[in-house]
Amino acid sequence: MQGRMDQGYAALEKIAGTSPDLLKSLLEGSPDTVSVSDARQPDLPLTYVNPSFQRTTGYASEEALGRNCRFLQGDETSTDDVARIRKAIADREPIDVVLLNYRKTGEPFLNSLRMAPIFDASGDLSAYLGIQRDITEERIRAESEISRNRLEALGTASGALAHQLNNLLHPVTSLISLHLPDIPDPGIRTDLEMAHYSATQAAELSNNLLGLSRGRFEEETGETTLPDALIRAVDLVRLMLPPTVTIETGFRNVPKDMNIPISETMFAQVIINIVTNASQATKHSGTIRIELADLEGSKAQISIADNGPGIPFGLRRKVFDPFYSNNISKNGTGLGLSVALQIINKVGGRIIVAEGLLQPNDDARGCMFTIDIPTIT
Amino acid sequence: MCHILLIDDMQPVRHAIAATLRKAGHDVVEADDGNKGLEIASSRQFDLVITDIMMPASDGTDVVFELKTKSSAPKVIAMSGGGAGIPADNVLQLSSTQADAVLKKPFTNDVLIETVSDLTSN
């Protein structure tokens, strides 16, 4: 080890001798952010940041130098992560951590940080080297992929279940309706009609699940037919949310076959993410109203309104920012709405945030997400 | 009244379909797989054969094609609810080229009776 280190030093000495600027250029040109903190001064002030630091964080090097790099932390930065960094520094150990940091604009980003104590040739701790990378986009893609896989797994399982259920429900509805006309007692007839109605509803739900599970998962692009796909997605999200949430729908007065250029899985993901967000906003105890409209035959418009606390006008664009959510750790990943917006933007659609339903005490309104998607003619 | 052979591996489903057909006045013989169904069909003359498509021991598509190769073939209805990974339309695609009618499960009693009387009225 010592030998290899000596060789490394020797090679660097050689570079420093023959092309003295190359070492500086390596640091300045690194695509990953490189920062150096002085371990000999109290509170480890930054003594060097490369240009990638400014590109990522928005802070120029003169704004950063002399400060401890904790100025990148903010409200939602995990205190556990910060404690782990402190411990690593105290133990003089290297550390890998993914940290929620904030750019100069206040925008949060996920910072994959590797930090290591640097000992000089004589073995004294002289600096801390930080290598950082903004992995926000990566994480959004991964999250989108994970929820797609989750939906696929759910689809496969519910498809198998739905198929069995259909076979079991057929005799129930068929035999009840077969013998119902022969029952003279009106009270018993009413009871059996209720049983028949419930079995029919169960079969309907099971069919919707079956539709969602079939062959629509492979392709990223595709075509989805409304309102059927929306009805299926809403049935699915009903199963995923606590029964304390009321979900109302209004799909009447729309054409039977509005086709949109998006696969049903992706579409379902958008609906699930936004409805789940609405449900969380009402603390899973409010009302969510979902409506579908046909805009001049060229766009499908889906509105999802809740009677939760609402979002102040100035913050409405912000809800799509990754990790905007106030309770990331408790209620999911903080990426649900970012993923939804990304999917919709990709097919040339848009999502607008406005005022939603009246709150239960009638003095203010909740929030409404309106999704416009161009239809295929 | 028609003589009907009903082939379906799911006993409760078969029972419900048979009961519906019998109540409508038809004579129904039941078989729980395609091979048994073909055996019965070769020994007796039926006006109509109703067969499920996806069955474990034998494929209903074979039943449809086999029946339709005979002279004086009976009318045939192919039915399916699809499988866990495949929609009913796809399952019925091949049979529909030979069968006189197809029924997608789940269907109502009325649809069943109507389809049967349409095929057997003349």
Image (cartoon, coloured by chain):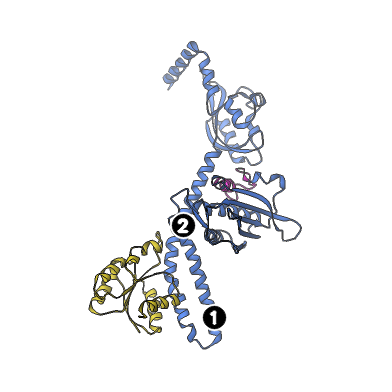
* Whole-percent x, y for residue A27 in the image: 54, 22
* Whole-percent x, y for residue B67 in the image: 27, 71
- Vertical placement of residue A335 versus B30, above or below: above
Question: Label 2: few (<14), some or many (≥20) within 10 Å?
Answer: many
- Residue pointed to by mark 1: A191
Chain colored blue = A
Task: Looking at the picture, tell me which residue is in the foreground, A222 or A9.
Answer: A222
Helix, strand or loop at mark 1 = helix
Q: Chain of mark 2?
A: A
Which of the 4 image quadrants contains residue B114? bottom left
Question: Label 1: few (<14), some or many (≥20) within 10 Å?
Answer: few
**The residue under label 2 is which amino acid type?**
Gly
Q: Is residue A45 magenta?
A: no
**B108 with respect to A312 (left or right):** left
Of mark 1 and mark 2, the one earlier in the sequence is 2
- Residue pointed to by mark 2: A155
Chain B drawn colour: yellow
Magenta stretch? A320-343
Residue at image coords 59%, 28%: A53
